[in-house]
Image (spheres, rainbow, N blue to C red):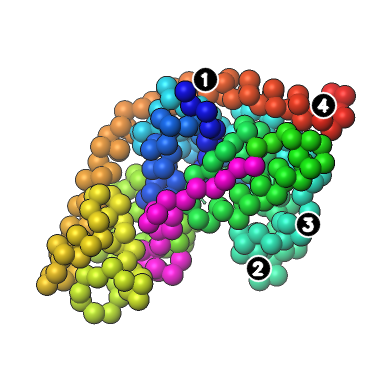
Amino acid sequence: MKTQRLFSAVQPSGNLHIGNYLGAIAQWTALQAEYDAIFCIADLHAITVPQDPVALRAKTIEIAKIYLAAGVDPEQCTLFAQSQVKEHTELMWILNTLARLGDLEKMTQFKDKSAKGEKETAGVGLFDYPVLMAADILLYDTAIVPVGEDQLQHIELARTLARRFNDRFGESFVVPEGRVTRGGARIMGLDDPTKKMSKSATSEYNAIALTDTAEAIRKKIKKAVTDSGSEIVYRDDKPALKNLINIYSLLSMKTPESIEELYRGRGYGDFKTDLAEVVIGFLAPFQERFAAISDEEALAVLEAGAAEARILATGKMRLVRERIGLIG
Ligand code: AMP
Ligand code: TRP
């Protein structure tokens, strides 16, 4: 009997990369048997920056297929798109009445995006984004939220809002906990090991997309920046190499120590050639499964998932409205 709820989501924007996989999705597939898991495609978060309507719809379906191909199993968990369950936005409004400007002004992601005097033109949706994320999480009595490290600050806000609501209106929400994996929590860019691998990076050499061809992967790894020296060592003072060894290790199930051992006395050339094959070998079966899933199949999974989620969400909102004194 699964007793604890797990919730996580990814935005349907940009191309999902191995950082998304190792930081978030790999945890999901590992935990879905143990937890009562809900996975969501955060399309309402994606529109906090301009999106082309046709592309947004296609991307949402693509992400559903990526989840399924990566091993998210609709028999074991619930999978849907955020906009299919209207209670997310309803709860967001209520949490907005508890969130403070000071809470949101602290958020690194907003500060980054509104830096350099861009605050005047930054969208209100972008500012309020963490409150919608808190609504996603709290709506389902979530106990754990598996994410990459960059999302922990947003989860902290969800905890704050849950406590604030509970203090004021009585125990209503579970206070959730973020969960990051060791090693995969922060995969860095191949072109710059000081910044995380990102869907929105400008250089095509920053990230390996889950849908990249073998040829593109070989080229990107060949071009990946390395540190000075020629030894293959897993050390903090060699951040580029550490990141590459991390990726190698997480995708091959070899420890960083055994990888150091394997390449003792050999150079970057051998290491990079093999790393490319490790990544390609890992992605090949995933890409085969991805190609075999039709749009219709993915949409049917989302619709069934949304129907399950709505039952939970409407029940929770009934309680929330009653606690607050709303008559609707
Ligand atoms: P995003 O790409 O910001 O929509 O993130 C989707 C999920 O992947 C979130 O749980 C992130 O924390 C995680 N994630 C994004 N980039 C990375 C990265 N470079 N390393 C590890 N996890 C990541
Ligand atoms: N903000 C998250 C990201 O960009 C996506 C997200 C939306 C999310 N709602 C969530 C993650 C709820 C965890 C829980 O990665």
Write the start and end of the magenta stretch as one range: 175-195
Q: Please name the residue shown 28% across and 79% down the image.
A: 228
- Residue 93: % across, % down: 77, 39
Q: CA distance from mark 3 to mark 4?
A: 26 Å
Of the residues tagged 4 and 1, which is closer to the observer?
4
Classify residue 70 by image quadrant. top left
Nearest the eye: 157 or 55: 157
Tell me the crowding category of disc 3: few under 14, some 14 to 19, or many 20 or more residues within 10 angstroms, Cα based: few
Labelled disc at residue 115: 2
Residue type highlighted by circle 3: Leu
Please tell me whether mark 4 sits on a helix, a strand or a loop: helix
250 or 113, which is in the foreground?
250
Indicate the amino acid at tag 4.
Glu
Circle 3 SS class: helix
Mark earlier in primary sequence (2, 1): 2
Q: Are the two marked residues, 3 and 2, in contact with CB atoms closer than 8 angstroms?
A: no
Sequence-first disc among 3 and 1: 3
Image coordinates of residue 315 in percent, x first then y, are 69, 22
Name which of mark 4 and mark 1 comes first in the sequence.
1
Q: Which residue is mark 1?
A: 304
At x 78%, y 57%, the residue is: 101
Left/right of residue 198 with respect to residue 311 in the rendered view: left
Quickly name the residue at label 4: 322
Distance (Cα) linking label 2 and label 1: 41 Å
Name the mark on residue 204: none
Secondary element at image label 1? helix
Q: Which residue bears the numbered disc 3? A: 101
Closer mark to the observer between disc 2 and disc 1: 1
Magenta-highlighted stretch: main secondary structure?
Answer: loop
Residue 308 place in picture, x, y as percent: 57, 21
User: Is residue 214 something that shows in the picture?
Assistant: no
**Label 4 to label 2, Cα distance in Å?**
40 Å
